[in-house]
Image: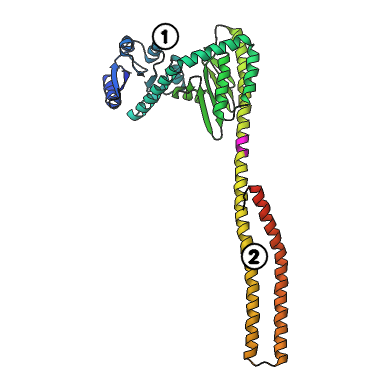
């Protein structure tokens, strides 16, 4: 039987802890603590897969401080932390992000919502641990690249690589790879009319990163708070987590270089959107051409069938009139007069059909040309 993941619920209200345990017990092994201090003392023995952490706790340290202390210990740095709070201001979400949380849920919330978020975060944390070895190797390669080329050279190399991106995901990953060449980590959000893509240096962006980037879009072209920096363009937002705030000269260079990188990505996002729109229009044109080919082909066949049927009908009329003339005992002059009138009428009809035949031939040639353009083979 599959072993349940351990979840640590930290809240100073007993009834809240009991409700969370009851709501999550069917899919998780839930333990609880009534304060941040108790939670910290339990971590080594418990080794939880995730932590649900109340923001406001009295007395003692609050949820943000508890999270910061957890993150200071490398043994527990990977554990996903979900904040719960009645406060929903962007400043509170930023505080949760600053402290190191992965998500922020506003009370009241449903147990199903919390369960889904926890499971997704646990799965993502396990995947990150699996990729730690690869990440370490990639970091070493990035540092080697930094030694072998100047930062501007690295920027030009990344901008050159952007042109190979055929999708928003490839473009976002190329931008984050460029960020890695500077020894930095962060997240990027690309926006088009078709939707929004948010990626992180860790792969999939956490819900809290998505929420923070959604709010930071309105903060102007460039904003920095402590070691976090955001650069905004119409289609791109870049969030850097670990700016070297103690080195102002390097910070200045990074701001310039990363602004150029973000601007280049913004141009590529717009280019991808234009190409996607062009492909959509091409597809529509081909579909219209196919429908026109089918319709005109049907009209062509129907009109040719009508021409043939008309000629057959005229011959039938002539034959029936000849038979009628015999049965009515007409004189020769009467019969000649009737036949002459009939011949003149048939000739007039055939002449009009001849004019239509010329138009019909033009329609047939048009159908053949449309089939060639549309790639339809008959």
**Image spot of residue 135 (x, y percent):** 49, 15
Q: Is residue 13 above or below residue 344?
A: above
Instruction: Provide the residue designation for mark 2.
Output: 304
Number of the label disc, if any, that sits on residue 176 = none
The residue carrying pointer 2 sits among few (fewer than 14), some (14 to 19) or many (20 or more) residues within 10 Å by Cα, namely some
Residue 277 in magenta stretch: yes
Locate residue 67: give its quadrant: top left
- Camera-side residue of 284 and 143: 143
The residue closer to the viewer here, 123 or 69, is: 123
Q: Position of residue 369 (x, y in %)?
A: 68, 52
Name the image quarter holding residue 240. top right
Residue occupying the point 69% across, 93% down:
331
When the figure is inspected, residue 351 is found, relative to residue 207, above or below; the finding is: below
Give whichever of 121, 63 is nearer the camera: 121
Residue 170, x across and y down, in percent: 56, 26
Q: Is residue 350 above or below residue 225?
A: below
Point out the stretch of residues depicted in magenta: 274-278
Instruction: Give the labeled residue for mark 1.
Output: 72
Q: Secondary structure at mark 2?
A: helix
């Amino acid at each position: 039987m599959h072993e349940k993941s351990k979840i640590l619920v930290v809240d100073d209200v007993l009834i809240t802890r009991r409700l969370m345990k009851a709501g999550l017990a069917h899919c998780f092994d839930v333990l609880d603590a009534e304060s941040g201090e108790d939670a910290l003392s339990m971590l080594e023995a418990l080794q939880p897969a995730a932590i649900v952490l109340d923001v406001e706790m009295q007395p003692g340290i609050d949820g943000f401080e508890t999270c910061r202390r957890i993150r200071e210990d490398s043994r527990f740095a990977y554990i996903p932390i979900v904040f719960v709070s009645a406060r929903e201001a962007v400043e509170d979400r930023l505080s949760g992000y600053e402290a190191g949380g992965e998500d922020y849920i506003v009370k009241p919330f449903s147990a199903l919502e919390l369960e889904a978020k926890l499971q997704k975060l646990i799965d993502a944390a396990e995947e990150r641990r699996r990729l730690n070895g690869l990440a370490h190797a990639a970091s070493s390669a990035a540092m080697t690249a930094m030694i072998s080329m100047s930062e501007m050279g690295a920027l030009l190399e990344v901008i050159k690589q952007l042109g190979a991106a055929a999708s928003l995901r490839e473009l976002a990953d190329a931008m984050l790879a460029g960020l890695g060449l500077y020894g930095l980590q962060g997240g990027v959000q690309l926006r088009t009319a078709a939707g929004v893509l948010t990626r992180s240096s860790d792969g999939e962006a956490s819900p809290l990163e998505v929420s923070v980037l959604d709010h930071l879009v309105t903060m102007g072209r460039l904003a920095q708070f402590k070691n976090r920096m955001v650069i905004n363009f119409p289609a791109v937002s870049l969030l850097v987590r670990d700016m070297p705030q103690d080195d102002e000269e390097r910070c200045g260079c990074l701001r310039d270089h990363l602004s150029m990188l973000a601007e280049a990505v913004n141009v590529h996002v717009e280019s991808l959107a234009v190409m996607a729109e062009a492909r959509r229009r091409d597809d529509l044109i081909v579909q219209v051409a196919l429908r026109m080919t089918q319709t005109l082909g049907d009209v062509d066949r129907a009109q040719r069938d009508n021409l043939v049927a008309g000629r057959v009908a005229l011959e039938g009329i002539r034959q029936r009139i000849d038979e009628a003339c015999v049965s009515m005992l007409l004189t020769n002059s009467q019969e000649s007069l009737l036949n002459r009138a009939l011949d003149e009428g048939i000739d007039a009809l055939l002449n009009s059909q001849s004019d239509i035949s010329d138009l019909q031939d033009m329609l047939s040639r048009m159908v053949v040309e449309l089939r060639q353009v549309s790639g339809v083979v008959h």
